[in-house]
Image (cartoon, grey):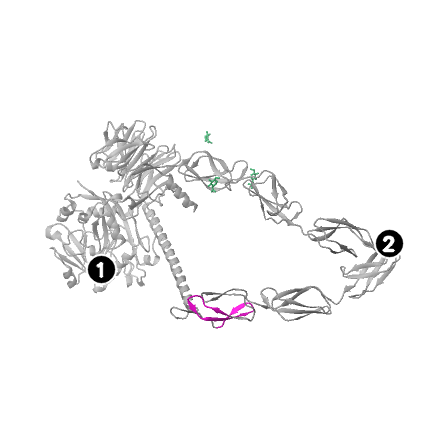
Amino acid sequence: MRLMALLLLRCEAVLDLLTDLKMPRGLALDLREQRLYWAEDGAKKIRSATLDGQDLKDVIVKDQVQEAPRDVAIDPTNQKIYWTALCCGLRRADLNGSNEEVIANAEFASGVAVLDDYVYWADWMHGTILRHHVVSGEEEAIVSGLASPVDVALDAEAREIYWSDVGLGRTQRASLGGNNVQSLNMSWAIMNTYGMAVDTDAKKLYMADFEKTGELSGRSTDYSGRIIRTNLDGSGAEVLVREPSMSMPYGVAVDADASQVYWTDRKAGRIQRLTLMCRNGTKEVRSRTNVTVVSVEHGEVFHGSSTTMPCPAGYNGTVTFACNDDDLTLVRGKCGKRCAPGTVEYRLDEKDPFSRALDYPDMDDGEELPTDCPGSLVGTVQLKCQDGAVLLREDQCRAARSCSAGEFLLGHALIQHSAMDHGIMEPSSCPSGFEGQYFLQCQDGEVIPKHNSSCRATCDAVGSLWVDDGRVEVSHGKIIEGGKVKVVCPTGSAGQGVHLACEDGYINVTESTCKRSSFCQAGYINSGGASVFHDNLDDKEEIVLACPEGFSGSLDVTCEATTILTEGSCQKGCTSGVVILSDLTIPHGDVGHGQAVQLDCPAGYTGILPFVCMDGNMTCTDCLCIPKATGSSKRSDLPIAAFAAGVTAAVLLLLFAAGVLWHRMLKRRAMAAAVAAAVGDIPAPLSSSCLDILPKTGVRSGHSSTSAPTASSGRGSTASTGYHRADTDVFEVVIDPPCLPLYWATKAGIHIFPDPNRIAEVQQLMTDTWLPHFTRDRQLLGGGRVPIGCRVANVLRVENHRSYARYLTYKDALRLKRSGPCTPFPLRTSNRINLLDDDVNESYLFHGTNPESAQCIARDFFRMERAGSSAGSMFGPGIYLAENASKSDEYAKEGSGVYLGLCATLLCRCAVGQVLTVPEARDTREAVRAGGFDSVCGDRLKAVGTFREMVFFQEEAVYPEFIVIYTRVFE
Ligand SMILES: *[C@@H]1O[C@H](CO)[C@@H](O)[C@H](O)[C@H]1NC(C)=O
Ligand SMILES: *[C@@H]1O[C@H](CO)[C@@H](O)[C@H](O)[C@H]1NC(C)=O
Ligand SMILES: *[C@@H]1O[C@H](CO)[C@@H](O)[C@H](O)[C@H]1NC(C)=O
């Protein structure tokens, strides 16, 4: 919850510096002049404003789209601005825009940065990082072999250059001379990291990153972006800003002194700023119970972190502040005011006329102190210091009870006393026959002797002594000094008698066995689980005892010569409550044991329920409620069925949620594998059962010239086939689930991720099959200019398990259709990329499209209903693929957004099967069906010297395995 709150606060903390800009891209700060400069692509301008977004100026204004600036860099020392554009070289000018000059040819330059007379830039087309010395004019490529580097950032202190390569989805750094290239740990990134900036002091790297989240509707909501900060090696990534409205953050710049980060949002057309530090000072917080305002001192706090400070003197506690942007907020803790020594007034209640004073010492906030009740009150009360005020808690004070008149046994003297108030002490002389003084005090209802009270019987008087705890009175005569007397037990008591001795003028009771007789001791009688108390009973005394609450019946008790005789018994009744009849709840009142009641079914049901209370349980042998509406029985099965259905639904929901989590986990693993692949690690291997039967050579990429063994990647799901290994061992294996290509990293779902290891070979395949022929389609679709080649920016591997399973099933069906293998049909792509199944003429073929559609097809299927929709369908409505990359390029379109300037072709696995070759354009569907063919080769190469096209009429005959993102290369 707290994290959520922090995120929300962060959103509010971002400042919109400038809005309504037209596609701002690169951004740079001039900290000497305290101004910011940015390339505004859509306006074809470089503009400038103060760091607070005031004093807007146009610095460079261009007319042509190609001249629109992409990125800017500032050299504050020489007061120069450098920028890149789609064309026309890397340029620079004075900060006011004058003295514009071209300083390097720098075609395809994207990000630019300046340091010490060197200007560095990324060439996204050729995959190089270059630098140019502005004085000597020397120019060199310091790093090459990249895919699509877009932005560069410099660490002036560590003398390093950073760049993001969106083609390979990774971020790297090297020394300024290009040595020691390292890939940063960027596994968290979505890989559309277009902007980068280094905070040299704090040793942090800032990046703008975004992903496509919606359909490409052209709105800013198609994207979702974030500003990320990491350590310089890419570790410790944290998302600084993730606003719902953040669309496509692009250029990033950081002002280390002011701890502020600036970025452009290309799609949302604005520049925003986040302040990354809260300054030292004092923060006012309300005290714990909001009675006072407390000023807490704190130091500097960085954005996104928190500080815990002790409360000032006079308060207890600590408070934790979190810094969000430049705003410090209290996130945890309280300051509670301490309590200075004092007095509270105590009254028993509002009506109590007496006010008593309770003193307390210095107390900490929250401290509790148990204290005796004041004045004449008895009990204890807790004093609690709460934010400066002392409260009384657990108040157990009450007025003490007084003592009623009665008897008190002191030694062997039975003393009568009158009623006494609590605390009152009465000194008295001992009764006649006894000598001494006593003090009785009434303590909260109890009479207690004090101050060595004692009464001693004297030998020289006739009198009485009390034994057996005062229950038996023994009379005695005078006893001579040293004399011993035995007195028999008086009437109403039994025993051997009482022995008295006179010593020093006083009588001692040396032995007494007299007990009050014919007397039943107080005690408990157990009956039917109830425990019933009776008092002392005299001989022959008879009483009737009621059973306790919750029981019925009564006990007739008689004392018969010290023995208790009982008649009658107690039975446990049923106290009011509810009975549960299947899922119906039916209330009932108190029901005595053995008593029967008729309960009613609840509203909506009918039926009579004869319940009986037996020893505390409501029982009914055949109770039944029937719903009124349908008349069907509602015993217990119906509600239980409903309950079961509910439980099932809940379990299904849980399973579904678990499934979603599982799917996410797989996706993360796949991402991790892709990232591992991107840094050159081997992808995670698949299940061992598949590995065993796959050929050990040739499955990895490469232009294998060895012929494919019988076993090959991707056998059918139900096939049970003998496989021949190189060593001619023959063994049977049932393959289930379908074996996947060895290099796949996932086992389920749909995943698309970069496969940079493929770039080189796919580039080679496209180059080898690129024939710059001019065709009718090229004229219709491409506007005429024929590219002489292409440059592969990235290869994405499609692991669409559903679609691949369909493809495998289709291949199996092809095999079953005929007894032997299909007539071989060599294509220009044969024996490239991977080893495939020759028996069904499995081949790789190209299908040109745009990057967005390529993703859709890869995630879904080729759709027959859309077949031939984008180009003429010369050979009937089907899926058209080409063996020449240049043919598929005719149908390729440049993408937008992230894919601006980029085309896509799908490199598909195709089950070509038996081929019908036709030279002229005509609908071939009927001929294919009639002749038992599986595909058509439209041979326009033979006919008019252009290309061969392969046409398929089954969606599942084609599996798009790679999405190739490329740019066209013109002369
Ligand atoms: C903040 O810190 C600076 C330097 O450390 C100090 O000069 C200044 O007085 C401090 N300000 C407050 C409000 O504590
Ligand atoms: C705290 O007290 C102030 C004024 O005494 C009041 O405006 C504020 O709403 C109180 N806040 C809370 C959380 O009770
Ligand atoms: C409360 O504050 C006082 C003085 O500032 C300190 O001595 C005491 O230990 C604190 N008590 C608690 C519970 O933190």
Location of residue 920 in the rendering, given as x and y in whole percent from the top left corner: 11, 55
Residue picked out by circle 2: 505
Please name whichever residue, 561 or 829, is drawn nearer the observer in this view of the structure: 561
Q: Is residue 149 visible?
A: yes
Amino acid type at image mark 2: Gly
Q: Residue at x 53, y 64 (%)?
A: 576
Label total for image = 2
Mark 2 CB near ligand 3 (8 Å cut)? no
Q: Residues within 10 Å of mark 2 (few under 14, many from 20)?
A: some
> Label 1 belongs to which residue?
839
Q: Is residue 934 left or right of residue 299?
A: left
Residue, far right: 480
Query: Is 425 located above or below residue 298 in the figure?
Result: below
* Earlier-in-chain disc, 2 versus 1: 2
Residue span colored magenta: 598-621
Is 750 situated above or below 316?
below
| Disc number placed over residue 625 in the picture, else none | none
Amino acid type assigned to the residue bearing label 1 in the image: Asp
Mark pair 2, 1: CA separation: 134 Å
Membership of 578 in magenta stretch = no
Name the image quarter holding the C terminus: top left
